Image: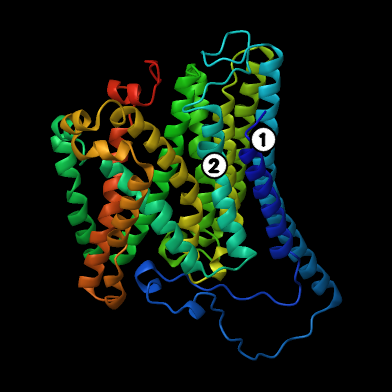
């Protein structure tokens, strides 16, 4: 049977999504609050709580009488929009609950055939998945942790919790420690320092690069920073997909091609469309200026067609593998369904109504990955640093040895680091070139994390990483 906690978590996430859809997307035909431009992080830190849910005070205007036909059309349009948004959120709930159903079915089929093992999938058994850590750990932390992001959506649109409270919770408990995790296995590891001196020393230049770019043009810098953050997030999901492909020997050339295409198209679809929304953050509105206005209406149908076409080819390939009794790599499908479904859902929700809309989007999308990353990092650290006596491990690896033995010490040190990584000193430096340079400098922590992560998780060539993640020596294509 599935782990009870996992089943309850998936059920709770699904119910929360349904309640959120009902409460928030109930059609309202009387009025629609004007969208508020999101303010940026440096301004947001000083913003008063009551300013977060700000709505412009209405200006009295003379209303022109509308014909009955026009009023009906307007109501019908609002209904269609609400229905579409409801469908997106409901789809996310179905993905989560559907994941549980698929896993239960896979487990039942595996048990019925007496083929419940931890070995590689056999040629005649499509339903014998292999997991990165274990079935329960993967389903709870690497796939089911999408429920954390669903909880952020529920807290935002139903409970209406102060966005800054949500953002600080994310920054302190989830995001900061996951950035800290990268440091524990690089700058605190003697072997990494010895083997990668140029990489670790050269990566520190991102602090200066960030400060320099922010001083030149703060708007372009912020667009670059948030775009890289999204790209990094997609790359991380792609990395988890590669781990599952390697574990399940899912390395056929066509599968590699269509999987990679689905990742970039699936995550690119909601991102590109979010740039052309009327309530898009001011940071990204420059993208609207690069494309002639007459083409804006074609962005959504074109990107949707590309996404559906790619998804159709992907689904056809899986159907062929099923009929041919080839391994289906079920963990990969669950991962992609949860991650891409989350991004499409967040992209469809009206975050522009919040002054902190941009930060809420970042926190909601990243929370899922934060939990994934922390669990994988702990698995890596335990395997690499947690063996043998502590004194011997300290001699070999240095301070990194401490972070593979006590999880709460690892998490606590990450929270302490975050208190410095998200400094309060920015609150009094909101404008001016020096303030921009300070903002760019502290973005350097994120840039350092993005860059190092693209170098230190390459299971294709790093034998020690393969051992720490127990990849069994298979080579990823």
Residue 181 versus residue 384: which sits nearer the camera?
Answer: 384
**Residue neighbourhood size for the residue with mark 2, other residues' Cα within 10 Å, grouped as few (<14), some (14–19), many (≥20):** many
Q: Position of residue 351 (x, y in %)?
A: 55, 64
* Residue 232, position as x, y percentages in the image: 38, 44
Residue 116 location, quadrant: top right
**x%, y% of residue 277?**
55, 61
Looking at the rendered image, the disc whose residue lies closer to the viewer, 1 or 2, is: 1
The furthest residue to the right: 68
Q: Residue at x 50, y 58 (%)?
A: 361
Q: Residue 33, located in which quarter of the rendered image?
A: bottom right
Left or right position of 205 against 130: left
Per the image, the residue denoted by label 1 is 100
In the picture, the quarter occupied by the N terminus is: top right
Percent position of residue 329, x then y: 56, 22
* Other residues around mark 1 within 10 Å, as few (<14) / some (14–19) / many (≥20): many
Mark-to-mark CA distance, 1 and 2 = 15 Å
Residue under the image location 48 percent in, 30 percent down: 241
Q: Which mark is residue 339?
A: 2
Q: Is residue 465 above or below residue 12?
A: above
Which residue does the image show at 38% across and 50% down from the upper left? 229
Instruction: Give the mark nearest the N terminus, 1 or 2.
Output: 1
Q: Nearer the viewer, residue 256 or 377?
A: 377
Against 245, is 285 above or below? Answer: below
């Amino acid at each position: 049977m599935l782990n009870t906690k996992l089943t309850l978590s998936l059920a709770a996430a699904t119910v929360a999504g349904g309640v959120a859809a009902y409460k928030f997307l109930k059609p309202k035909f009387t009025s629609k609050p004007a969208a508020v431009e999101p303010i940026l992080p440096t301004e947001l830190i000083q913003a008063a709580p009551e300013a977060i849910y700000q709505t412009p005070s209405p200006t009295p205007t003379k209303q022109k009488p509308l014909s009955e036909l026009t009023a009906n059309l307007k109501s019908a349009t609002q209904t269609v929009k609400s229905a579409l948004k409801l469908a997106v959120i409901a789809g996310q709930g179905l993905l989560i609950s559907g994941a549980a159903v698929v896993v239960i079915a896979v487990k039942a089929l595996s048990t019925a055939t007496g083929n419940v093992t931890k070995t590689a999938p056999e040629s005649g058994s499509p339903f014998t998945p292999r997991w990165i850590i274990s079935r329960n750990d993967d389903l709870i932390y690497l796939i089911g942790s999408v429920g954390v992001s669903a909880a952020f959506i529920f807290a935002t649109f139903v409970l209406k919790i102060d966005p800054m409270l949500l953002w600080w919770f994310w920054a302190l408990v989830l995001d900061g420690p996951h950035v800290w995790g990268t440091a524990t296995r690089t700058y605190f590891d003697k072997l990494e320092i010895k083997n990668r001196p140029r990489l670790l020393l050269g990566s520190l230049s991102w602090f200066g690069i960030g400060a320099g770019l922010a001083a030149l043009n703060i708007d372009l810098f912020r667009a670059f920073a948030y775009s890289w953050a999204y790209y990094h997030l997609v790359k991380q999901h792609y990395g988890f997909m590669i781990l599952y492909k390697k574990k399940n020997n899912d390395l056929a050339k066509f599968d590699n091609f269509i999987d990679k295409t689905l990742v970039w198209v699936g995550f690119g679809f909601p991102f590109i469309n979010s740039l052309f929304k009327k309530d898009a953050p001011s940071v990204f509105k420059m993208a609207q200026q690069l494309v002639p206005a007459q083409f804006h209406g074609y962005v959504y149908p074109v990107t949707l067609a590309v996404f559906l076409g790619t998804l159709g080819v992907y689904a056809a390939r899986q159907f062929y593998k099923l009929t041919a009794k080839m391994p289906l790599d079920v963990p990969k499908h669950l991962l992609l369904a949860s991650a891409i479904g989350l991004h499409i859902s967040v992209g469809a929700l009206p975050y522009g109504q919040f002054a902190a809309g941009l930060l809420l989007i970042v926190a909601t999308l990243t929370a899922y990955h934060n939990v994934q990353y922390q669990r994988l990092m702990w698995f890596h650290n335990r395997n690499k640093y947690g063996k043998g006596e502590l004194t011997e491990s300290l001699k070999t690896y240095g301070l990194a040895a401490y972070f593979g033995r006590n999880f709460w010490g690892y998490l606590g040190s990450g929270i302490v680091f975050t208190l410095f990584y998200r400094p309060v000193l920015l609150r009094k430096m909101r404008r001016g070139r020096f303030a921009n340079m300070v903002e760019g400098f502290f973005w350097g922590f994120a840039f350092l994390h993005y860059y190092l992560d693209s170098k230190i998780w390459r299971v294709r060539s790093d034998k020690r990483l393969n051992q720490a993640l127990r990849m069994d020596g298979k080579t990823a294509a």
